[in-house]
Amino acid sequence: MKQLKKRLQQGATLHGCWLNLGSTVTTEIVGLAGYDWVLIDLEHGAGSEKDVYQQLQALEHTPAAAIVRIESTQRQRIHRILDMGAEGIMCPRITSAAEAAAVASGLHYPPDGTRGVAKMVRASSFGQNFQNYYQQAKENILGIVQIETLEVLDHLDEIAGIDGIDVLFIGPADLTMSLGIFGQFDHPLYVDAVKATVNAAEKAGKATGILFANPDEYTRYSNMGIRLIACGADATFVANGARNLAHTLQTFRSSGKSGQS
Ligand code: 3PY
Ligand code: MG
């Protein structure tokens, strides 16, 4: 474990990015790039649960902690990913405090929650480290719910107060879609929803997170108190790198520097 939760609780701002290619190779490359954490995306990403296992292996020797966004809040989905060794779980599209409480419960072993016990799993070095893993799981596993539906905005305080929910993570795309102002990140309805989320999290001693594409947005969100910051995704790193280079080559060709007329 890479102490993500502890660092967040100590007030650190932590940088991450999305991994949506389902590729062990880009996972390893990005893991070595200097991010504090990465998010393997099972909600929208190209990978499957089997890929997650190998991506977690690829991240093992990198400094980046692994969070996995699962596609449903089912207890069994949470268990399986935690047993593979993920350090945090993100659940999208939360609508109620009851749903968030069920997520929190699935994240932790009894008496704190309802996580099933299996010793022979990757998270506990296949039983060789179970006692240690079990004792430290509560303080190491980061519980994240996404704030991106209309319904959830009426339950922010309740959700932030749930033991085991550590981060309220804003999903700007879905949140603006839910508010009927898709992509309008300066719209007062969106700005108010972000502020209300940060406020609820701060009152409960929890953190807030967000994903954005353009690093110019960093200061704006960080000044609002958001500390789990995600910027970029492996798919866009590849797409932007390829597009920029292809464009540069085309510029050379059309300026005649390629030697062709
Ligand atoms: C969204 O923008 O909706 C996301 O889920 C990414 O954070
Ligand atoms: Mg979303």
Image (tube, grey):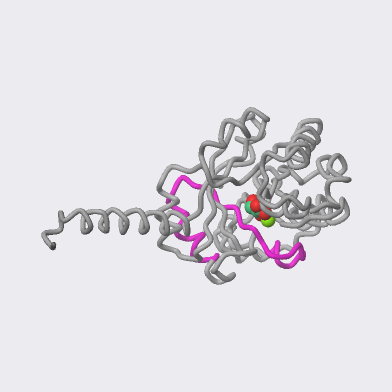
The residue lying toward the viewer, choosing from 3 and 227, is 227
Q: Quadrant of ligand 2?
A: bottom right
Residue name at image x 64 percent, y 29 percent: 11
The x and y percentages for residue 91 are: 71, 56
- In-image side of 31 versus 14 (left or right): left
**Quadrant containing the C terminus in the rendered view:** bottom left
Q: Is residue 89 visible?
A: no
The residue lying toward the viewer, choosing from 155 and 161, is 155
The x and y percentages for residue 187 are: 72, 40
Asked if 248 appears above or below 12 in the picture, the reply is below
Does residue 74 show up magenta in the picture? yes
Give, as a single range, the part of the protein colored magenta.
52-79
Asked if 77 appears above or below 151 in the picture, the reply is below
Q: Quadrant of residue 14?
A: top right
- In-image side of 31 versus 208 (left or right): left
Q: Quadrant of residue 89?
A: bottom right
- In-image side of 231 versus 142 (left or right): left
- In-image side of 233 versus 102 (left or right): left
The x and y percentages for residue 121 are: 60, 65
The x and y percentages for residue 61 are: 43, 51
Does residue 166 show up magenta in the picture? no
Residue name at image x 73 percent, y 42 percent: 166
Q: Is residue 42 visible?
A: yes
Residue name at image x 64 percent, y 41 percent: 5
Q: What is the count of numbered marks?
A: 0
Asked if 163 appears above or below 58 in the picture, the reply is above
Asked if 80 appears above or below 150 in the picture, the reply is below
